[in-house]
Image (cartoon, grey):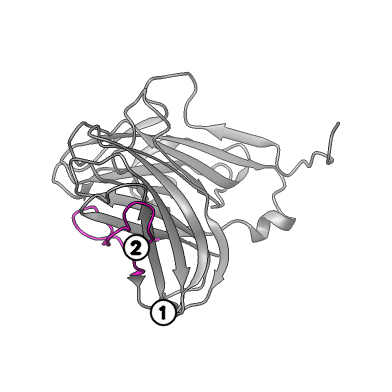
């Protein structure tokens, strides 16, 4: 039984991969210097229809007992010299190798116009590092109505730091909540959604699962926006698997943003986080 009438405005999806492959999507190489971006690489020549959101999967960067943190930007533009960033610093922290697990999956409600080439670039804490991005674009010929309010012009990354990490914090151990850690004292724009990304400089993960909370508001009076976002870690192999679906909320300019984390076991050291915020 069909529960609703199919709508023509959301009937199209496209990816940047045409056949099954061990490293799905498009390979990106970071800069020749550590913590520097590589060149823009085209991941799609231009969509048939406008896209309302993008699902990204970052993989093929994990290595046993090695910290391999990555940022991946996604942009649009006519050529590699004229790219506008629309998704900033996606977390590629030690995502699963090419044929192991999901890697890091992010739902990015960003509108991509039809016919415009889509690009990506990679920064890592190791020189000339590889990562793969698989992007699925979903949309249709007449996006409008409800989708106008559910898509952003861009997604920015809050709390990013050098070298290719986020803002440091201490997670609670054995199921306990850690303390709220400030990501930004005062936002410069109004934001309409929030999501989480995780990094660490720890080369010996305990294999704990982490659950993250995101909030806004003054210290001691935080308003919870996203609760118990899961990041799963595998011991010793330094792999993570994260599926991030952003939480929709109206965050006014001037807001303080904070996060906290709980670990299923002993908390790993050098834990850091970033927050992804949608700009309308």
Asked if the residues shown at circle 2 and circle 1 are in contact, with their CB atoms under 8 angstroms apart, the answer is no
Image spot of residue 172 (x, y percent)? 33, 58
Image quadrant where one finds the N terminus: top right
Task: Using a 10 Å C-alpha cutoff, classify the residue at mark 1 as few (fewer than 14 neighbours), some (14 to 19) or many (20 or more).
Answer: few
User: What segment is highlighted magenta in the picture?
Assistant: 157-181
Instruction: Give the SS element for disc 1.
Output: loop
Looking at the image, can residue 85 be seen? no
Instruction: Give the SS element for disc 2.
Output: loop
Residue wearing tag 2? 178
| Side of 143 where 243 appears, left or right | left
Q: Residue at x 39, y 64 (%)?
A: 259
Is residue 174 shown in magenta?
yes
Is residue 24 shown in magenta?
no
Q: Residue at x 69, y 49 (%)?
A: 143
Looking at the image, can residue 217 be seen? yes
Q: Residue at x 13, y 45 (%)?
A: 33
Instruction: Return the residue found at the far left.
Output: 33
| Side of 31 where 179 appears, left or right | right
Gap in angstroms between the C-alphas marked 2 and 1: 14 Å
- The one of 42 and 31 positioned closer to us in this rendering: 31
Image spot of residue 110 (x, y percent)? 54, 52
Q: Main secondary structure of the magenta part?
A: loop
Image spot of residue 198 (x, y percent)? 34, 51
- The one of 9 and 79 positioned closer to us in this rendering: 9
Residue wearing tag 1? 220
Task: Using a 10 Å C-alpha cutoff, classify the residue at mark 2 as few (fewer than 14 neighbours), some (14 to 19) or many (20 or more).
Answer: some
**Which callout, 2 or 1, points at the residue further toward the start of the chain?**
2
Q: Residue at x 42, y 49 (%)?
A: 75
Image quadrant where one finds the C terminus: bottom right
Vertical arrangement, residue 117 with respect to residue 220, above or below? above
Quadrant location of residue 272?
A: bottom left
Image spot of residue 155 (x, y percent)? 46, 58
């Amino acid at each position: 039984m069909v529960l609703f009438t199919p709508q023509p405005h959301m009937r199209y999806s496209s990816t940047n991969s045409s056949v099954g492959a061990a490293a799905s999507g498009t390979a990106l190489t970071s800069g020749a210097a550590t913590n520097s971006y590589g060149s823009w690489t085209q991941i799609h020549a231009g969509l048939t229809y406008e896209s309302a959101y993008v699902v990204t999967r970052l993989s093929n960067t994990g290595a046993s007992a090695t910290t391999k943190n990555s940022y991946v930007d996604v942009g649009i533009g006519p050529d590699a010299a004229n790219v506008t960033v629309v998704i900033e610093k996606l977390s590629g922290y030690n995502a699963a190798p090419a044929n192991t697990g999901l890697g890091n999956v992010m739902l990015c409600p960003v509108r991509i116009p039809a016919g415009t080439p889509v690009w990506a670039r990679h920064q890592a804490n190791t020189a000339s590092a590889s990562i793969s991005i698989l992007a699925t674009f979903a949309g249709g010929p007449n996006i409008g109505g409800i989708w106008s309010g559910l898509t952003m012009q861009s997604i920015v990354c809050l709390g990013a730091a050098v070298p290719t990490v986020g803002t440091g914090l201490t997670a609670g151990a054995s199921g306990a909540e850690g303390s709220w850690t400030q990501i930004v004292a005062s936002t410069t724009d109004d934001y309409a959604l929030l999501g989480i990304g995780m990094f660490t400089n720890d080369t010996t993960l305990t294999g704990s699962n982490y659950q993250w909370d995101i909030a806004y508001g003054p210290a001691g009076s935080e308003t919870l926006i996203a609760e118990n976002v899961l990041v799963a870690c595998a011991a010793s192999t330094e792999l993570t698997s994260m599926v991030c679906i952003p939480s929709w909320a109206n965050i006014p300019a001037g807001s303080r943003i904070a996060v906290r984390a709980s670990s299923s076991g002993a908390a790993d050291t050098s834990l850091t986080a970033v927050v992804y915020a949608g700009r309308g």
